[in-house]
Every structure is written in C-alpha cells, then in structure tokens.
Amino acid sequence: MSTDIADEERERLALTHLCERLPDLRAAIPSRPVEYETLLTAIVAAARSRTPIADQLEQLIRFDVVRSDRRLPHEMPFGPGHAHEEIARCPDNACSRTERPRPAGVSPRCRVTGERMPNRSTG
C-alpha cells in the first residue's frame, strides 16, 4: 500500500472515530484540562474543513490514556426501533460512519458538520 493511500485511510478512520465519538468527547470537557477543549475545538474545525486530523486526534486521546478515570459517558441504545431497510451515511463520504435512522424520523446529522446524513436503501 502506498504512503498516500495509507495516509488517506488513516485520516478517514480518524474522521470516522471523531464523528462517532464526538458527543462523548464533548461531554468529557468539564472533567478535562482546558487544553483538551482547545484541542477538540481545533480538531472539529479541521474536520469541518476536511483537513487532516489524525495526529491531533491522537493527542486528544492521550489526555485519556494518562488519566486513571478514562471513562466517557455513553448514550444508551434504548428508545424506538430503527429502520431496517435504510442506512444514513456521511454527507460527503469523508468518513465511514453509518447510522440507522428511526422509523418515520428525520435523518441523523453529521456530528462534525451538522449536515443531514442522506439515507440509502440497504436492500
């Protein structure tokens, strides 16, 4: 695999991780040093402009590695069911995040850009 392709895949995985974990990362801000919030803000800005974030995201993750209380809050999977024939994907295909929309509900939003995630049929 060439270096360019490996770098592109690394960035895609980083953006996917950020998009999936952004609510948890934001919820952790009160219990982290001010540098954590500054770095997270910079990462989100870079992600919105689709510039590389993998190195910065690794720095952010280190905040949790050096702490003994690494736990982040998680959303519980309770509530209405999900549509089984549609899946929402990244609005500009920049990451690999997918989410099943709720039946008769609105499409989920990208956690980085705030754009609606388009639904596509899985069948």
Image (cartoon, helix red, strand yellow):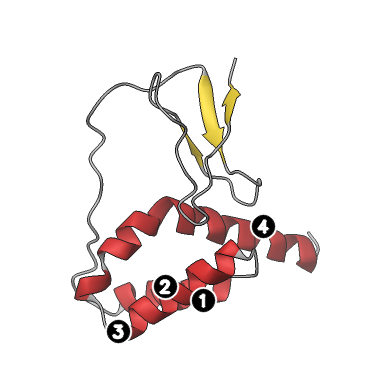
Q: Is residue 120 left or right of residue 5?
A: left
Mark 3 or mark 1: which comes first in sequence? 3
Please name the residue that numbered disc 1 is placed on.
56
Tell which of 64 and 85 is nearer to you: 85
User: What residue appears at the point 39 percent right and 55 percent down from the top-left corner?
Assistant: 21
Mark 1 or mark 4: which comes first in sequence? 4
Please name the residue that numbered disc 4 is placed on.
9
The CA span between labels 2 and 3 is 10 Å
Q: State which quadrant residue 55 falls in.
A: bottom right
Q: Is residue 55 left or right of residue 104?
A: right
Tell which of 109 and 12 is nearer to you: 109
User: What residue appears at the point 65 percent right and 45 percent down from the top-left corner?
Assistant: 93
Label 1–label 2 contact, CB within 8 A: no
Task: Name the spot of residue 122 as percent of width and height, x first.
Answer: 58, 20
Please name the residue that numbered disc 3 is placed on.
34
User: What residue appears at the point 50 percent right and 71 percent down from the top-left corner?
Assistant: 43
The CA span between labels 2 and 4 is 21 Å
Please name the residue that numbered disc 2 is placed on.
40
Number of other residues with Cα within 10 Å of mark 2, as a class: few under 14, some 14 to 19, many 20 or more: many
Mark 1 lies on a secondary structure that is helix
